[in-house]
Amino acid sequence: MSKSVKRVRAALEAAGLDVEIVRTPDQTRTAQQAADAVGCEIDQIVKSIIFRGETSGAAILFLTAGGNRVDDAKAAALTGEPLGRADAALVRAQTGFAIGGVAPIGHLSPIRAFLDPRLTAFETVWAAGGTPHHVFPIAPRDLERLTGARVAGFTE
Ligand code: 5CA
């Protein structure tokens, strides 16, 4: 098991969640690929999208329903500073994961997070498990608890 997947598993276990991280035969680099692999609705896929606060330089996590897009202005209004996309190097340094497999939990450093209310419409949602070949199911409420995310609208 890769170090990335082990970090996600450790975070789930530390939170007392008995969840199996599933290895998918096909890549789950995009929300559509993940939804196809799991056989769920696209909005049940959690995209872990990372922005960079242009004033603070801090990485900020937007847990976004698979079919939604982050609205830059709404997201910036929530964070209180202008935002830019995090580049691959910042994503890697902050989370320890490579783009396409960024999990919402098990990051190298704590990260401020927001959660798309659309995700709370489902009993279970699926997030990347640390690689573009791993996903795991979680209740939105548990995702909120583990990430410390604030539920707030930031999508188009
Ligand atoms: N495993 C899938 C489904 S969970 C996944 O990770 N999807 S994702 O949407 O969370 O991750 C892909 C995201 O990475 C894209 O939405 C995009 O925001 C970001 N991304 C893709 N390419 C780049 C890049 N070159 N630089 C910065 N961010 C990127």
Image: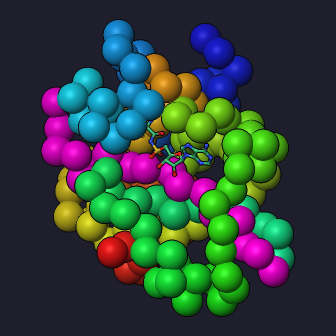
- Vertical comparison of 102 with 38: above or below: below
Asked whether, in this view, residue 77 is left or right of residue 36, the answer is right
Q: Where's residue 131, x and y in %?
A: 55, 26
| Residue occupying image coordinates x 45% and y 20% | 133
Residue 119 sits inside the magenta stretch: no
Q: Where's residue 106, x and y in %?
A: 65, 41
Q: What span is colored magenta in the figure?
A: 38-55
Q: Where's residue 89, x and y in %?
A: 78, 43
- Vertical comparison of 33 with 51: above or below: above
Q: Residue 30 occupies which quadrant of the picture?
A: top left
Q: Residue 59 occupies which quadrant of the picture?
A: bottom right
Residue closest to the eye, 76 or 118: 76
| Residue occupying image coordinates x 55% and y 89% | 77
- Vertical comparison of 19 with 124: above or below: above
Residue 48 sits inside the magenta stretch: yes
Q: Where's residue 102, x and y in %?
A: 57, 40
Asked whether, in this view, residue 109 is left or right of residue 39, the answer is right
| Residue occupying image coordinates x 69% and y 85% | 81
Asked whether, in this view, residue 99 is left or right of residue 31, the answer is right
